[in-house]
Amino acid sequence: MRFVVFFIVSIIFTKSHLTRADIGSWEMFMFIAGLITFFWVTGIIQSLLPLYHRNRTYRKTGDNGTEKSPEIFNAFLLLCFFSLLVFALGHGIKYNFSVFKYSGNVPYLNLLLLYVLLSSPVCLIEYIYLLNNLSYRIFQYGVYTFSAQLILIILPVVLGKGILWSVYGLLAVTAVRWIWLIVLLVRYTEMKISVEFMKEHLYLGLPLVLTSLISGSAQYIDGIIVSAVYRDPGMFAWFRYGAKEFPLVLMLANGLSNAMLPEFSTRSRMKDSLARIKMKSKGLMHICFPATMLIMLFARWLYPRMFTPEFQKSADIFLIYSLLVIPRLIFPQTIVVGRKKTHITLIASLLELAVNVPLSLLMIKWGYNIVGVALATFIVYLLGKVFLAGYLWVKMKIKPGEYIPIKLFLIYSTLLTILFVLIDHRVIDIH
């Protein structure tokens, strides 16, 4: 739902009175909000999942028997602490910070910092439901809040207002989510501060925080490179509209990975958990690979019709990002993090960063322009998954075949690559 909402927003913005520079400002607002929060939010939440009811702090005291969770409450406090820290640091340096040399400060910087302060802790809502086996509540929460978000973002633009009013709408929905979060904290958590658990949580989570910070993830590292090299909000808008993975793949892959994390936290269930993730990833492959092939066939036809003809260039970037379905649908990182070997993901991220930035700059130099940045991301992400799979095989004696349906994966990957080459060389050209 999150992806669908922002996808609809993108379409409506391009067909409204907004200029490409206005759209670039909105994209930059959302980009920076994610850039300065995603790494510590990801680290704190992903390290909470294997610690939930399986940690030294509450195992020793015997507090696991309580229905309400002190672990979730202390994770909430950590999220609030980091939010306040980023908010304070942002205000401290805001007059010395800009994105493009000629365009001055970041758009709506005060509102951006307020959004960062409020939006990061509410990411915990869906995981409170997940850890309490209330997945249907996640769906209900999404329907209510994302419907409201869609309306409050697009309505001002439809009525002829500027981007600023859409930002106000985004903040209003975030305030509603805070009320929702407080209700859940009262209902499902034991409000007991534990410095001991926070230490344990940070010990496990800091490598994940650093992993995300260093590797950045494809969209953030790519966005930084594009904004640094071209310094053009219009070019940045072109890139951002194309630099989107197929939402179905990203949602299902991340959902499976997060849901399986707690299952790998105990050694006794290892064999069963490996078999389950292999079976579930096989099911995802049957859905995601054919769906990706279909969307790739029509990408060049869809983009100028969904947006405007000037966003035709974005389709070529999207085609390369669609290839990320190949590394997305194998899950060595889930096993590594579930087994609390988070320092290994940190090493993998260092490897990715060491390759991504120079390879992206080389691609630009060789004439691939912003398309080359996307291609470098695919290569680097695949390399990171190979490294993690190699660690599992060599150090933990877990062969790829134990958690990857290898034959099916290779068949689908080969077919997808062939299709991409045919589309890229315009042998198949639907436009």
Image: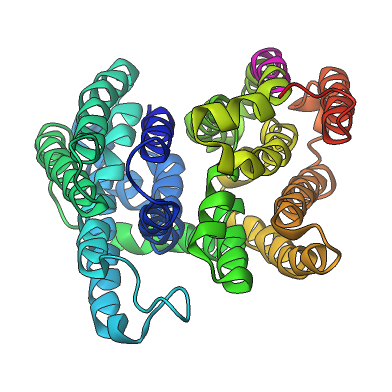
Dominant secondary structure of the magenta stretch? helix
Q: Position of residue 140 (x, y in %)?
A: 25, 19
Point out the stretch of residues depicted in magenta.
Answer: 282-293
Residue 168, how many percent across, how many down?
16, 50
Whether 22 is drawn above or below 138: the answer is: below
Question: For residue 336, what is the image quadrant?
Answer: top right
In the image, what residue occupies the spot 45% across and 80% down? Answer: 102
The residue under the point 35% across, 28% down is: 130
Q: Is residue 269 above or below residue 93?
A: above
Q: Quadrant of the C terminus?
A: top right
Given residues 94 and 198, the one toward you in this image is 94
| Image vertical order of residue 229 relative to residue 383, above or below | below
- Horizontal side, residue 382 vs residue 54: left or right: right
At 44% from the left edge and 61% from the top edge, which residue is drawn? 35
Q: Is residue 26 left or right of residue 366?
A: left
Q: Is residue 427 left or right of residue 206?
A: right
Vertical placement of 19 versus 173: above or below? below
Q: Where is residue 51 shown, x and y percent of the image?
A: 41, 44
